Image (cartoon, rainbow, N blue to C red):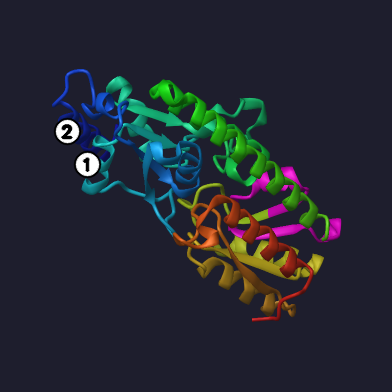
Amino acid sequence: MNSRIKWIVASLLAMLAVSPGGNVRQVSAQGSDPIAVVATIGMIGDIVGQVGGDRVEVTSMMGPGIDPHLYKASAGDVELIANANIVFYNGLHLEAQLGEVFERLGDRITTVAVAEAVPEDQRIVVGTGAGTYDPHIWFDVELWAIAVEEVRRALTEYDPDNADGYEERATDYREELTELDSYVAEQALLVPEEQRVLITAHDAFGYFAGAYDFEVLGLQGVSTATEAGAGDIQELAGIIVERQIPAIFVETSVSPRSIEALQEAVRDQGFEVVVGGALFSDAMGDADTNEGTYIGMVTHNIDTIVDALLGEISAE
């Protein structure tokens, strides 16, 4: 365990020590008080709000533009977690050090890794290590509905008196996701098969590719902890030129430098590729905007991708 993880775990255990059985708020919240929930990323926080309704008070640790792969918890985060009744996180190593912290807390606080509810045979394996999976489950809308069910299950287990409400809201939300899944699939089909190539800064869209029949090429791997080198940029630039790919995309939670360098490398080879817009990958948009919801984020992404690949934007 590295020193930062030791510090976070020790700090949390010290804060939780006021109750020998765990977090003292876990008992009172099952009455009339709302359940204090911490979600690591906005996409999970949105599910909890949809399923929990007024029974939950949700705080998302990582807001718009925050990269969970590189996130380091602060003292304020530690206090937030210690005062939560339930912590929902993605898992599959998305949250890096934080995921290890949640695993080590044991029964001191309720923690739920929603993406790990997805069966292993439906996950994308990455790298060569056993049990290493792409964590970006939310880009397959149908798979993300499994996370909704996991949130419903956890809330019901924690607060069984309100099980009917959780079930009703989860059912309604899953129906909305079914409609969203159909919309994304229909929009994807507007792009001819040979043009369905999505190029981004890091390889976050593997589940999107599998679900909606796209080819995805990222400059970095599934984590932004590694950087693209000059050779990677030149190699991908050659592919863009050879295949006449019209657009590439930046991500709101990743620096645009590598994509800008890729665009320049393509230009040096005598071809013009446009930056087709900004996609939401590891974070949603600002609160109180349509893109600040999971459904709005996914809708924005597919609309942006389709418009750019069909040449319906001007060169930058």
Q: Which residues are magenta?
A: 191-216
Res 228 seen here: no
The 10 Å Cα crowd at callout 1, few under 14, some 14 to 19, many 20 or more, is some
Comparing 34 with 14, the one in front is 34
Figure check: 248 above or below 222: below
For the N terminus, give its image quadrant.
Answer: top left
Mark 2 residue element: helix
Res 35 seen here: yes
Residue 176, by quadrant, is top right
- Residue 142 at x, y percent in the picture: 67, 38
Residue at horizontal 22%, vertical 18%?
21
First reached walking from the N terminus: tag 2 or tag 1? 2
The 10 Å Cα crowd at callout 2, few under 14, some 14 to 19, many 20 or more, is some
Comparing 51 with 116, the one in front is 51
| Direction top: furthest residue | 21
Mark 1 residue element: helix
Q: Which residue is mark 2?
A: 15
For the C terminus, give its image quadrant.
Answer: bottom right
Disc 2 vs disc 1: Cβ atoms closer than 8 Å? yes
> Which residue type does callout 1 highlight?
Glu
Residue at horizontal 72%, vertical 78%?
272
> Which residue type does callout 2 highlight?
Met
Residue at horizontal 48%, vertical 65%?
255
- Residue 129 at x, y percent in the picture: 55, 31
Q: Which residue is mark 1?
A: 79
Residue at horizontal 21%, vertical 37%?
7
Residue 128, by quadrant, is top right
